[in-house]
Every structure is written in structure tokens, then in C-alpha cells.
Image (spheres, rainbow, N blue to C red):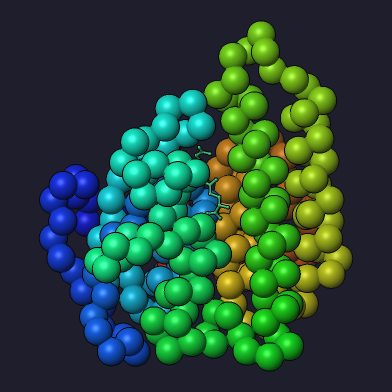
């Protein structure tokens, strides 16, 4: 997944020449376990602009905040994209759309009516990831004696509802080509397999599972398998 691992102070200027007038240097605060980071890196790879990114380790959590991340994004969350003109872009939705623009536009974020499908699917998939991450934090970060079963059950209920909706309403769409909604869905499902393998969602969602087997074999997905 990693093109270059460098410390924050060691900024080797890397530029991407795309469709903007000026070359843009871009540093991406990332971690190899984050599904949102994976989403933007898969987007960059699919758009052929990945080589223009400098990857900066930004591993962080709500209880062990990475100060280098907070300096760029007051929410303390990754991904965050630092541009050489001082702008910082976040969150993953904004960064993915920025990459799309750099690559000429309307590739992963289609124009016209199709846009609403693509970004609604992205919202559904990201929302499922949000629920999974909250359940992960509850079961992993929170001290054992303070964990709240009802909270975890609520998040797992959201995940199940999203999986059911993806299977029922989106399986045909997913097979129709790649856009930001498909990438977000692939990364959300990959995160479930990474952190919640016991859910065995593939046993109960056959069409989604078939799509994920194929989508997950793409080089962009294989190059970004989560670790940690
Ligand atoms: N909506 C954000 C979510 C980003 C997010 O929650 N990232 C996690 C890593 S997977 C994070 O940075 N967590 C640290 C925290 O919540 O303090 C996005 O799409 O980028």
C-alpha cells in the first residue's frame, strides 16, 4: 500500500501534473488500517494519480490523538490531504472528489443524475464503516468494565441493515462499473472482513459477496489490504 514512508519533517516535494495549471504537491496523512484512507488511495490508484502522493504516517485514535494530525485537521481524523499552498482537505469524501477533479473530473463522481446514486451509495457505505468503527472503538479502546453491550448491538444492527440494503437494492448497480460508491462499498466490506470476520456477512449476502470477490481482486484493492 505504501509508496513512500517518510517522517513529517522530511517533505520530499512530489508533484502531480494533471489537468490543473500548476503542479500540486500532496501529502496524505494515512494509516494502513483505516478504511477511509483505503478509499482515497484506491480512488487515487484507479485515477492513476497515486504516484503523486506522499504518504505520511498519521496513525491516530480518539484516545491517543496524533498531534501532527490535529495540526492539519482539528477533528484529529485521517485521511487528511495537505497541499503545498497551505490548504488541507478532509474528509475522505472531499479528498476523493478532489482527486477526481485532478484527473479530469466526472470519472468516479459522475455528472448529472448519476451523481446522486454514486454519492448516496458512498454515504451508505461510509455510514456502515462509521458504525463498524464505533463498534470497534467500543470493543477495543474502551476499558472492559465500561463497555456498553446495547451500544455495540445498536451499531451491529446498523451494519446488518446496511448489508441487507446493499444486497437488495444495490447489487445490480455495483456490477455496472466503478465509481466512488463502489469504492466506498468495497472498502467498507473489506473493513468488516478485517475487524469483524465473525459476522460472516458473505454467507448471508450472496450477490454482494460475489461482487466483492471480483471487486476485491482489482489491483487497487489488492495493493491496499488493511494491516494492523
Ligand atoms: N468521515 C471521515 C471519517 C474519518 C475517520 O473516522 N478516520 C478514523 C481512522 S479510520 C480516525 O481518524 N479516527 C480518529 C478519531 O476518531 O479520533 C472520513 O470519511 O474521512
* Picture layout, residue 53 above or below residue 8: below
- 2 with respect to 127 (left or right): left
- 200 with respect to 36 (left or right): right
Of residues 130 and 177, the one nearer the viewer is: 130
Instruction: Assign the N terminus to one quadrant of the image.
Output: bottom left
* Picture layout, residue 16 above or below residue 90: below
The answer to which image quadrant residue 207 occupies is: bottom right
Query: How many numbered discs, if any?
Result: 0
Of residues 60 and 180, the one nearer the viewer is: 60
Residue appearing at x 28%, y 89% in the figure: 21
Q: Single out the residue that lies furthest toward the top.
A: 145
Q: Does the rendering let one see residue 211?
A: no
Of residues 150 and 21, the one nearer the viewer is: 21
Residue 162: % across, % down: 79, 54
- 61 with respect to 27 (left or right): right
Q: Does the rendering let one see residue 17?
A: yes
The answer to which image quadrant residue 20 occupies is: bottom left
Residue appearing at x 47%, y 34% in the figure: 61
Residue appearing at x 58%, y 80% in the figure: 109
- 82 with respect to 173 (left or right): left
Residue 151: % across, % down: 77, 28
Residue appearing at x 67%, y 72% in the figure: 119
Residue 177: % across, % down: 62, 82
Instruction: Assign the C terminus to one quadrant of the image.
Output: top left
* Picture layout, residue 116 above or below residue 6: below
Residue 184: % across, % down: 60, 63
Amino acid at each position: 500500500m505504501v509508496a513512500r514512508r517518510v517522517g513529517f519533517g522530511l517533505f520530499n516535494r512530489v508533484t502531480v501534473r494533471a489537468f490543473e495549471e500548476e503542479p500540486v504537491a500532496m501529502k496524505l496523512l494515512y494509516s494502513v488500517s483505516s478504511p477511509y484512507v483505503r478509499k482515497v488511495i484506491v480512488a487515487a490508484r484507479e485515477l492513476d494519480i497515486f504516484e503523486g502522493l506522499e504518504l505520511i504516517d498519521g496513525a491516530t485514535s480518539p484516545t491517543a490523538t496524533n498531534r501532527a494530525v490535529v495540526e492539519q485537521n482539528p477533528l484529529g481524523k485521517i485521511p487528511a490531504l495537505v497541499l503545498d499552498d497551505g490548504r488541507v482537505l478532509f474528509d475522505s469524501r472531499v479528498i476523493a472528489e478532489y482527486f477526481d477533479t485532478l484527473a479530469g473530473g466526472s470519472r468516479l463522481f459522475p455528472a448529472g443524475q448519476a451523481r446522486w446514486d454514486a454519492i448516496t451509495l458512498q454515504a451508505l457505505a461510509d455510514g456502515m464503516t462509521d458504525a463498524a468503527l464505533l463498534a470497534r472503538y467500543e470493543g477495543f479502546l474502551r476499558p472492559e468494565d465500561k463497555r456498553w453491550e446495547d451500544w455495540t448491538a445498536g451499531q451491529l444492527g446498523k451494519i446488518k441493515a446496511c448489508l441487507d440494503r446493499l444486497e437488495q437494492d444495490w447489487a445490480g448497480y455495483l456490477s455496472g462499473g466503478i465509481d466512488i460508491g463502489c469504492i466506498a462499498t468495497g472498502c467498507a466490506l473489506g473493513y468488516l472482513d478485517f475487524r469483524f470476520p465473525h459476522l460472516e456477512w458473505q454467507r448471508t449476502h450472496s450477490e454482494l459477496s460475489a461482487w466483492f470477490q471480483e471487486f476485491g481482486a482489482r489491483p487497487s484493492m489488492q495493493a491496499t489490504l488493511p494491516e494492523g
